[in-house]
Image (tube, grey):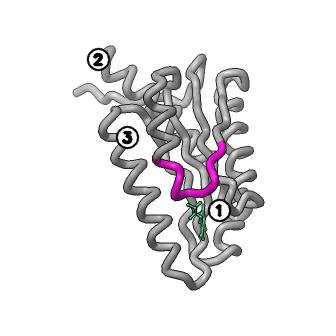
Amino acid sequence: MNTIEGNLVAGNAKFALVAGRFNDFIVNNLVEGAIDTIVRHGGNRDNIDLIKVPGAYEMPVAVKKVASLEKYDAIICLGAVIRGGTPHFEFVAGECVKGIATIATQTGLPITFGVLTVDTIEQAIERAGTKAGNKGGEAAAAAIEMVNLLNAIDAA
Ligand code: INI
């Protein structure tokens, strides 16, 4: 039996971070977590581009454009959608995840989801570098693994 899997070596892979400005006091920590993870896994800062969008709702259009350039090995989506007692939350979070998932499956490009969808600011803080880790770093690690997995499948 052969197991085909991706390692966590970033190497010369090129990454696009697509990050929302909305709730930027949270999202900036996710961006830092993603960059730190790529660099600590052997990646190069010069191979990382940061693309900023207004909010999570706009993310799919930017991700689609970035994917169409065919110059990145993976796209890492970073944002924070915080409920705050309004139905807006469902629409913003729903359209964001649906759009990104559609682009990922249509293009076959590794696109990872580091967009927090939480009820409270406290939950967001917990996931942006405090007691529940850093979801930006986790999304970056998943992107590195997926880049290497696709290469490993090709080579198998
Ligand atoms: N955008 C976010 O990224 N997070 C949120 O929590 C949020 N809330 O709560 O409204 C949010 N809204 C803005 C939205 O993404 C669009 O930028 C806006 O509607 C303009 O199209």
Q: Which residue is mark 3?
A: 104
* Figure quadrant of the C terminus: top left
Q: Quadrant of the N terminus?
A: top left
Q: Is residue 69 above or below residue 17?
A: above
Q: Earlier in the sequence, mark 2 or mark 1?
A: 1
The residue that label 1 is drawn on is 127
- Measuring from the top left, give residue 27's x and y in whole percent: 69, 55
User: Quick one: label 1 or label 3, which is nearer the N terminus?
Assistant: 3
Residue under label 2: 156
Q: For this rendering, which residue is in front, 6 or 23?
A: 23
Residues under labels 2 and 3: Cα distance? 22 Å
Residue at 65% x, 33% y is 38
Q: Decide: is 48 above or below 92.
A: above
Specify the amino acid type for callout 3.
Ala
Q: Is residue 81 above or below residue 61?
A: below
Name the secondary structure under disc 2: loop
Which residue is painted at 44% across and 38% down in the image? 64
Q: For marks 1 and 3, give the CA distance.
A: 24 Å
Quarter of the rendering containing residue 120: bottom right
Image coords of residue 76 (percent x, y): 55, 41
Which amino acid lies under the numbered mark 1 shown in the image of this protein? Answer: Arg
Asked whether residue 78 is drawn in magenta, I would say no
Residue 104 pos. (x, y %)? 37, 40
Range shown magenta: 52-60
Identify the element where label 1 is drawn. Answer: loop
Neighbour tally class for label 3: few under 14, some 14-19, many 20 plus, Cα within 10 Å: some
